[in-house]
Image: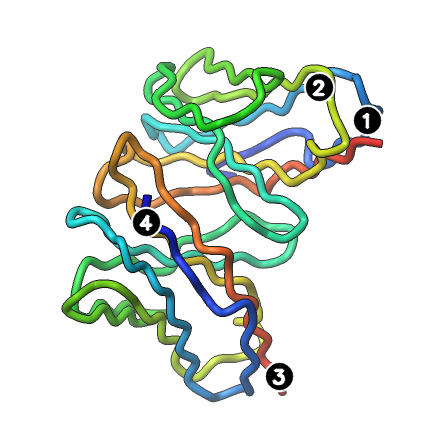
Amino acid sequence: LAKTTQPISMDSYEGQEVNITCSHNNIATNDYITWYQQFPSQGPRFIIQGYKTKVTNEVASLFIPADRKSSTLSLPRVSLSDTAVYYCLVGFTNAGKSTFGDGTTLTVKP
Amino acid sequence: DTAVSQTPKYLVTQMGNDKSIKCEQNLGHDTMYWYKQDSKKFLKIMFSYNNKELIINETVPNRFSPKSPDKAHLNLHINSLELGDSAVYFCASSLRPPGNTGELFFGEGSRLTVL
């Protein structure tokens, strides 16, 4: 299984761009990378998914280098409401066994 | 309408008791899951069912028994509860069986506290 490593925590200020990197050195060829956001007392919520290069949606961008051994979630112009735990999830193959990262607690300050 | 709903949201019980958590999804998804999130926020998959058939069974004590009466429901029964079972249990669903891509839809979680 692809093991993932993320920073435990990050601080930012409103209006800044935040980049959270996830390392996944033994990612499998068919594995996609997915990021989830979790607020206190809620379940994780899908943010973005990608396989290579760059993916962008209305809330975030996901950058994946050519070797795919890491990925970076980019949140543009964060607000206080972006304070949450962000999880990197690699793979959903191999009979569905997937590995969530340990999560990065992002704190956005005014 | 809540897409993935779990009951109860909170559960406090004594060691040795048996308890159940129920989950229902109205998304029409084929696959459902149970995840455990401990006090350090680590999320670990426990079970997955596809169309009522067990497809993932991680290393979980056999005191935990999932049951899927139909593809919209996946319940979790826990026998002989132990202190270490205290956690938040999340139910999730996905449109298709685990594959290369796909999105997980999570419920709000059920916080189990074993005293």
Quadrant in the rendering for residue A72:
bottom left
Q: Amino acid at mark 1?
A: Thr
User: Which label is found at residue B19?
Assistant: 2
User: Which label is found at residue B60?
Assistant: none
Classify residue B92 as left or right of residue A57. Answer: right
Say which residue label 3 marks. Answer: A109
Q: Chain of mark 3?
A: A
Q: CA distance from mark 4 to mark 1?
A: 36 Å
Q: Is residue A74 above or below residue A45?
A: below
- Disc 1 element: strand
Residue B10: give x, y in percent of width and height. 73, 36
Identify which residue, A15 or B18, lies in the foreground.
Answer: B18
Residue B1 is at least partly visible in this image: no
Q: Residue at x 21, y 63 (%)?
A: A68
Say which residue label 4 marks. Answer: A2
Q: CA distance from mark 2 to mark 3?
A: 41 Å
Quadrant in the rendering for residue B5:
top right
Q: Amino acid at mark 3?
A: Lys
Callout 2 touching callout 1 (CB < 8 Å): yes
Same chain? Circles 2 and 1: yes
User: Which label is found at residue B13?
Assistant: 1
Q: Amino acid at mark 4?
A: Ala
